[in-house]
Image (tube, rainbow, N blue to C red):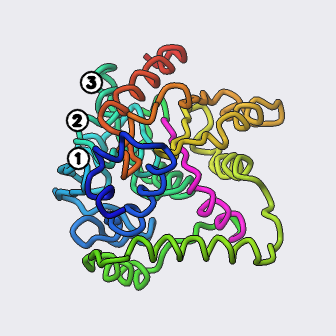
Amino acid sequence: MRFLVCHPDHLRRMSRKLQNSIGYLYIQGERKVMPFLKECSRYSPDFGYTLKPGRFVFTEREFSNTYHINSLGVRASEEALDGPQVVILGDSFAFGWGVDQDEIFSSLLEKRTNLKFLNTAVPSFGTVREMIMLRSIDRSRLRCIILQYCGDDYDENIRYYRNGNRPQIMRKQTFHRLVRLHSRPRRYFFGKYLWMKIKKKTNEFMAKRKKTGQPPPMDETDMFLYVLKQNRDILDGIPIVMFEMNGVRQENRITSLLAKRAAHESQPEFIRNMRILDLSGVLKDEHYYVLDGHMTPEGHRILADTIYDALCDMGII
């Protein structure tokens, strides 16, 4: 297991099941967490954290990239904050984790369309914080929103609902505790991955035996739509392109359901008109890093082409 974690090129030639298994060990046992590294992030009372303005290098087994962060705490130029025409909302997938700045799909689209793009995606942000981010920027020239959804967004969205439509923002003390925790070296010791496997299986077994509590008030799809509708005042009249991204183990859990529910006559017009992209037949396994699970530069290029076609169909360009 250690050999395969250290040699992802060999792992790529093996079965998908083994790739998933080794990828889990890498992510849980070795991969650094950018939002909680002191050289990469800072505390924010509005978001819990944003990225630290300036420049830093983030290196993992499959890539090493330089990140340029503006005063808002997002991966874009300072000039991009002034009247963007297209805004990207999302998490680490839209942010461009693992690729250089000029390789992100938003950068490729900006060059191709001659429109002014602002990529506000931040790793691990859910729909709720993405809407807070949208409220914090200049929307005076906004022509389109590109919104990326990940299955991890559900936890943030349901906490928002259960908290009476108030976001639950991480406290400053919690942020600094997590920074101390994740700034420690993640050293390997003999038997580490076997121990992780046993722990994972034990947790899965105990979860099955544990009695379930009250069912959630809404499923993942309806919860996503619920958060959007609570932000109708800033979304009405703005064309939205939405896509789901869950990494190399792409499941598109809500894409097909969302397309049906968003089209229902009871939905507000901005949701009925939302362009929902299905990437399941577009992005393949080879377009993701085999260990890390984020998109490669080629994956970003394909995503840029797909979104470009949607923008053309919608008359944005």
Q: Which residue is mark 1?
A: 78
Image location (x, y in percent) of residue 183: 27, 77
Q: Is residue 214 magenta?
A: no
| Badge 3 amino acid | Lys
Residue span colored magenta? 146-163
Q: Which residue is mark 2?
A: 102
Residue under the point 29% across and 59% down: 3
Q: Nearer the viewer, residue 233 or 59?
A: 59
Res. 239 in view: no
Residue under the point 71% across and 46% down: 221
Of callouts 2 and 3, which one flags the residue occurring earlier in the amino acid sequence? 2
Distance, label 2 to label 3, CA atoms, is 9 Å
Res. 251 in view: yes
Q: Is residue 155 magenta?
A: yes
Q: Is residue 182 left or right of residue 213?
A: left
Mark 3 against mark 1, which lies toward the viewer?
3
Mark 1 residue element = loop
Q: Which quadrant is the C terminus positioned in?
A: top left
Q: Residues within 10 Å of mark 1 (few under 14, many from 20)?
A: some
Residue under the point 32% across and 38% down: 296
Label ID, residue 297 = none
Of callouts 3 and 1, which one flags the residue occurring earlier in the amino acid sequence? 1
Residue 50 image-quadrant placement? bottom left
Label ID, residue 111 = 3
Of callouts 1 and 2, which one flags the residue occurring earlier in the amino acid sequence? 1
Distance, label 3 to label 1, CA atoms, is 17 Å
| Badge 2 amino acid | Asp
Image location (x, y in percent) of residue 158: 68, 62
Residue 181 image-quadrant placement? bottom left
